[in-house]
Image (cartoon, rainbow, N blue to C red):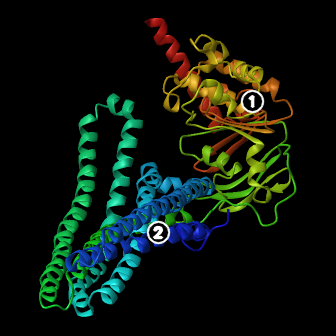
Amino acid sequence: MKDQKKSRLFYHIYKNRFLYLTGLIALFIVDYLDLYIPLYVGEITDGLTSHTISMTAIDKKILLMIMLSLVIMVFRFFWHYFIFGTGQKILNNLRKDIFEKLETLSQSYFNKNKTGDIMTRFTNDLDAIEGAIGWVVIMSFDAVVLTLMCIYKMITHVNLSLTLFTLIPMGLVGVYSIVLARKFDEKFLVKQKAFGQLNDAVQESVTAVRVIKAFVQEENQLEHFKKVNDHNRKANADISILRAVYWPIMETFIGLSYVVAIVLGGYYCLIGVITLGRFVTFSSYISTLFWPMIIVGDVVTTLSEANASRKRIDEIFETEIEIRNSENPVDVRELKGEIIFDNVDFRYEDDLPLALEDINVTVSQGEMLAILGRTGCGKTTMVNLITRVYDVTAGSIYIDGNNIKDIPLDVLRSNIGYVPQDNFLFSETIKENIAFGRIDATEQEIYEAGRMADIHDNIMNFPNGYETLIGERGSTLSGGQKQRTAIARAIIKDSPILIMDDSLSAVDTDTEDNIINNLKRIRKGKTTIMIAHRVSTVQSADHILVLEEGKVAEYGTYQQLIDKKGLFAQMVEKQQLEKQLSTIEQGGN
């Protein structure tokens, strides 16, 4: 999808302009035919007053008005269908475009923008736009066309001076609305941002409810919510105050027009400038004009709110896509699994220190590489560079001799199985979560992946087996069960490269051994990168990489690093001592 320099909303409106035009033509016909009914009423009134009209003529005009009403009804259906139907089509495409754009944005965008605020753009902001591309289009067109046609009829069929005097207060409504339009625009932008913050506060609190309860932070969370909620209330109150000022003044101007029409029109009728029938017609036209004048307020406020929402949605489309395909991609569909880090540096932001520095590592095809290090040393960052969640700041990463920036993103990621640190699961069945790694997987393949992840027996003990719904983010599963489900999801993909980011931390040592032995058996000839904290996890790895403050501290086989008596040997000694102390404590109890 190519980025559009113009607003994406305007792009879709232009794309569907002929459907809108069809609806507006139907609306124009309705407005035009509507003007004849007051004329017929006026002619009947004059005829009755002067006793110059017969019952036959009255019957014909009434029949004509009925026929006009039926035609108006048909064209009303057409403008409803084309304008509102087109509006829904535009919203559907706009929502799809937003989602598609979000899928192309890098992780850094989601680090800077909260989920609640993004969700608000899908809901409240699109709701505001829906009003603008539906009712506002109708009201604005109707107001302009109906007003112009009414004024023309009032001048040509009634009286010029009466029309001009009556319209002076109505003209002030337009000036007044334009003056306040910018103020409404500013207030609505603040309101939408405030609602996004409120939405985010609720979303975070609901997601973290177990943490809140565990730390007895209900009162603090309530206070935080009160502040965000009060800010949202104030933002909405500011708009209400502006409306409270706007509407009474606008209604006063409209009332003045009606007073002028009655007083001056009545006077003109008494002195014979216009007939009673024409005065009735004029009064009907004035009543018709009230609606366009009244909706000016709705148009101003709805357009202001929609414009603020449009700006917020356009912010998403204007966000630069940081991770994109090369202009000259290599022609490759399958990867073998050799990975080379060549003088790689990486920092998350320009003003932050390097998270990785001078990384030079080669992972041969079919090798199992274990990465260890203290928390925050750059382990996850390193594997995120392989999947191009982020791009390197300096240096290069090669897979099978090709710079990963030249490998098409879909090829790169489809050839990598990934078990993330947070073990994210969808609110679906266990079967659907495992099959997410390969949508076309058979039931037997799903079962086999479960066995390789050593979770099959656990699943079969659930009342619904693999059809068990696991709740939001896998909330009904234990930490170990979530990890093993995520491992099964990656295993079923059977990719040339498998990355496991601390994926065995929540399982016991026996289960860990089973999974590692299964992986060694099913992944012969395929590359596996395993991040771990427990030394026992990495004993069978071909090579071990130890990171320290973003740099390679040690690299070699298990025995080489033990013999070196460096940082890795210290980690092994410390964990063995902790295990011995734990065994002694358990024996004492």
Q: Which residue is mark 1?
A: 492
Q: Is residue 180 left or right of residue 408?
A: left
Whether residue 180 is visible: no
Q: Is residue 413 left or right of residue 196?
A: right
Q: Which residue is mark 2?
A: 27
Q: Is residue 288 visible?
A: yes
Viewer-proximal residue among 212 and 316: 316
Q: Nearer the viewer, mark 1 or mark 2?
A: 2
Q: Identify the image quadrant of the C terminus.
A: top left
Residue 537 to residue 379: above or below: above
Whether residue 285 sits left or right of residue 73 in the image: it is left
Ranked by sequence position, the earlier of labels 1 and 2 is: 2
Screen quadrant of the N terminus: bottom right
Residue 299 locus on image (x, y percent):
35, 69
Location of residue 246 (image quadrant): bottom left
Q: Secondary structure at mark 2?
A: helix
Residue type (three-letter) at the residue carrying disc 1: Ile
* Residue 262 place in picture, x, y as percent: 15, 79
Residue at mark 1 to residue at mark 2: CA–CA distance: 57 Å
The relative height of residue 416 versus residue 440 in the rendered view (above or below) is below
- Nearest the viewer among 25 and 563 is 25
